[in-house]
Image: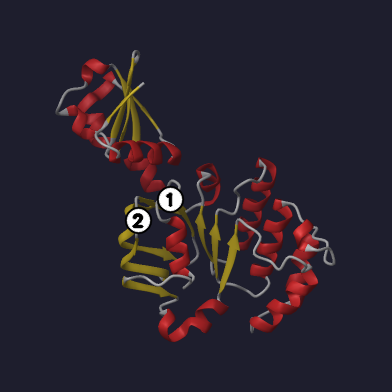
């Protein structure tokens, strides 16, 4: 299976933060969700994927090429969808069409007008007057109109209402139907990924926690609920973090089969959300497995 993106032992240091030995791949024809809390390295990673930042060490390959020798060719094949206004203040969609048409060899006017009509975008209205939802549609229309093979999305649904987020996911689902396109979708709204993601890559504090197929997460991870009397020094080792209360405990395990074997019918096993996994991973990393409530 072809990898569209490959990071190998990528390292980037800042005065108060670093991305450390980051290695993962993004497979062609699939949607990869990129998750993690605020300030854990998601935006830094995306900037390196776009060659807006250069890693201090390690290698980044896009379409099997590196930016040192093939930057123009790589960027011709990428569409970028950002959560903020990246357009010129006074520009219209017609203005942006002219700019993009001169920049991309595969620019398709027919496709551009199709998406402008499909997304109900006013073509002569200044983009600065667009709502956040319209801004996102404009960004997506421009990305799709040059036949991008890889769409990189940085928090595309942030601040959007649930109905529009659902519409956006339907658009992305349609875009993926030919099996030739790839989406790398960074978001903290993890419920959106439940609908569309094939793979999940999770980073925390600049380090890779895992990069797995979505179904693997469902098979491996579980929320365990039971009486606190079941916990001791040995059983607590089974968990990433434990949340105790007056009613018992709730904990996250990354080895559902082992936990089920250990506790049997004395506990309740539930499917964790991606948000659960992020929360318990953060709490576990902050200093021990115990969370008292």
Q: Nearer the viewer, residue 273 or 189?
A: 189
| Tag 2–tag 1 contact (CB < 8 Å) | yes
Q: Secondary structure at mark 2?
A: strand
Task: Tell me the residue at 70%/65% (across/down).
Answer: 141
Q: Is residue 119 visible?
A: no
Residue identifier under label 1: 39
> Residue 26 vs residue 122: left or right?
left
Q: Is residue 245 above or below residue 52?
A: above
Total numbered labels: 2
Q: Secondary structure at mark 1?
A: loop
Please state the horizontal and vertical placement of residue 219, each as a whole percent of the image.
35, 42
| Name of the residue lying farthest toward the front | 15
Q: Which mark is residue 17?
A: 2
Q: Is residue 276 above or below residue 99?
A: above
Task: Tell me the residue at 40%/72% (across/down).
Answer: 54
Q: In which quadrant of the rendered image does the N terminus lie?
A: bottom left
Q: Is residue 288 above or below residue 28?
A: above
| Name of the residue lying farthest toward the top | 246
Distance of mark 2 from mark 1, alpha carbons? 9 Å
Q: Nearer the viewer, residue 40 or 170?
A: 40
> Residue 124 vs residue 171: left or right?
right
Q: In which quadrant of the rendered image does the C terminus lie?
A: top left
Q: Which mark is residue 79?
A: none
Please state the horizontal and vertical placement of residue 9, each as a whole percent of the image.
29, 66
Q: Nearer the viewer, residue 266 or 158?
A: 158
Please state the horizontal and vertical placement of residue 112, each as a whole percent of the image.
74, 71
Question: Which mark is first along the chain, 1 or 2?
Answer: 2
Task: Tell me the residue at 47%/58% (across/down).
Answer: 43
> Residue 169 vs residue 258: left or right?
right
């Amino acid at each position: 299976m072809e990898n569209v993106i490959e990071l190998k032992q990528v390292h980037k240091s800042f005065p108060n933060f670093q991305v450390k030995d980051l290695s993962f791949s993004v497979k062609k024809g699939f949607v990869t969700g990129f998750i993690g809390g605020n300030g854990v390295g998601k935006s830094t990673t995306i900037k390196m994927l776009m060659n807006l930042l250069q890693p201090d060490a390690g290698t980044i390959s896009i379409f099997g090429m590196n930016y040192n020798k093939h930057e123009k060719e790589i960027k011709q094949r990428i569409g970028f969808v950002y959560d903020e206004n990246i357009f010129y203040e006074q520009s219209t969609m017609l203005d942006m069409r002219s700019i993009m048409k001169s920049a991309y060899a595969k620019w398709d006017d027919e496709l551009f007008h199709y998406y402008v009509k499909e997304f109900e975008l006013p073509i002569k209205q200044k983009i600065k007057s667009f709502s956040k939802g319209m801004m996102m549609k404009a960004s997506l229309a421009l990305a799709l109109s040059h036949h991008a093979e890889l769409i990189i999305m940085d928090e595309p649904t942030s601040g959007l209402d649930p109905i529009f987020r659902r519409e956006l996911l339907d658009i992305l689902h349609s875009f993926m139907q030919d099996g030739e396109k790839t989406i790398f979708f960074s978001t903290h709204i993890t419920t959106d990924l439940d609908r569309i993601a094939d793979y999940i890559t999770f980073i925390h504090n600049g380090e890779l926690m895992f990069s797995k197929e979505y179904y693997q997460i469902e098979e491996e991870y579980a929320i365990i609920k039971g009486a606190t009397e079941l916990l001791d020094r040995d059983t607590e080792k089974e968990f990433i973090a434990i949340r105790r209360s007056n009613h018992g405990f709730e904990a996250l395990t990354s080895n559902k089969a082992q936990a089920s074997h250990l506790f049997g019918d004395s506990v309740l096993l539930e499917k964790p959300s991606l948000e659960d996994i992020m929360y318990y991973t953060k709490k576990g990393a902050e200093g021990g497995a115990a969370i008292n409530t």
